[in-house]
Amino acid sequence: MELYLSPIKLIISGPKALRLVPEISFYYQKPLIESQLVFNCRYAISEQVSLANWNLVFSGESFNDTIIPYKWQIFNKNEQVAIHIIFEEHDFLKEVVATIDATQKQIQVFITPKHNNIITIDPLFHPLGSLLMVYLAHLSGGLLIHASGVKDGNNGYLFTGVSGIGKSTMSMLWKNSGAELINDDRLWLHKIENQWFIFNTPMVYYAQEPKMAPLAGLFLLRQSPENQLLPIKGVQSSLRIMANCIQQFYNKQMTSTHLDRVMDLTSSIPVYDLGFKPDTEVVEIIRKYNQ
């Protein structure tokens, strides 16, 4: 099986006791663009995987165990990354360890089940897929960001901000005005021949065919009684965009590289502070501004 995430190609393999069936990743079995990196992604069932020789560098856990009933950790060893997920309430998974070897272009996924039955699972099951994509985007020169995105004619627009600020609302305003929805929660940004593009990613709660659009504007959302569009430039634009990127980086080199990419993005794509109210007037304002 092969899966494609923006410029990444994953060659998937696993044992017979593990049925790897694309569900959330069903539509990602064909490439949108030419693959730049190819990883062999091998799955295995294991009773326990030791990370004793690895360094714990990052930990995350849910603030709401009902919505996100798992904990996760990031380890490193030399140039390798390991993702450890501990499930607290799952029908058949106990824990998962995934190692990423960028030098050998290999990903190993070790699944510890709760029982001995044959497991049927998507290769990019949650939250493994989401965590893997952070590092795959980084390795391929891209970025992941919490944002909604639309394609309006030949222009792609990205709308970002804190949870609840109106990313999905903005997407629907554009969709109702004839634009194409790229994604309303998470976007993969990738640069092709000096042009930044937005790509959607496999989502847990709904299926969507892969889509992309050339990026023409970055919009930092805030709610307002009136629609207001204010350009932002310089370091402020980079830092505000970076604050909404998905980043679990644990050393100076990774963080510096990430910042350089954000600065490249904000120096080549206009950034705006967008105060908006939920009506289609804001769509027309942006369209006229970009004519």
Image (spheres, grey):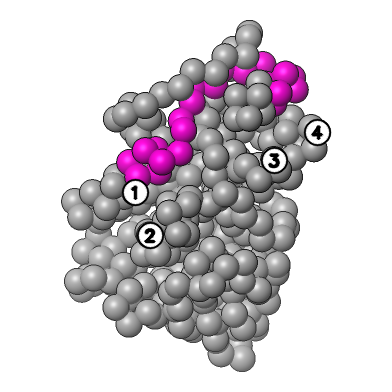
Q: In this view, does 113 lie to the left or right of 166?
A: left
* Residue marked by disc 4: 176
Q: Is residue 187 above or below residue 217?
A: below
- Give the crowd class for mark 1: few <14, some 14-19, many >=20 residues within 10 Å: many
Q: Which of 214 and 93 is in front in this view?
A: 214
- Give the crowd class for mark 4: few <14, some 14-19, many >=20 residues within 10 Å: few
Q: What stretch is highlighted in magenta?
A: 263-284
At 49% from the left and 70% from the top, the residue drawn is 8
- Residue that lies at the very extreme toward the bottom in this rendered image: 16
* Residue marked by disc 3: 152
- Does 92 lie within the magenta span? no
* Residue marked by disc 1: 261
Q: Nearer the viewer, residue 216 or 210?
A: 216
Q: Is residue 149 left or right of residue 75?
A: right
- Type of the residue with mark 4: Asn
Foreground mark, 4 or 3, reads: 3
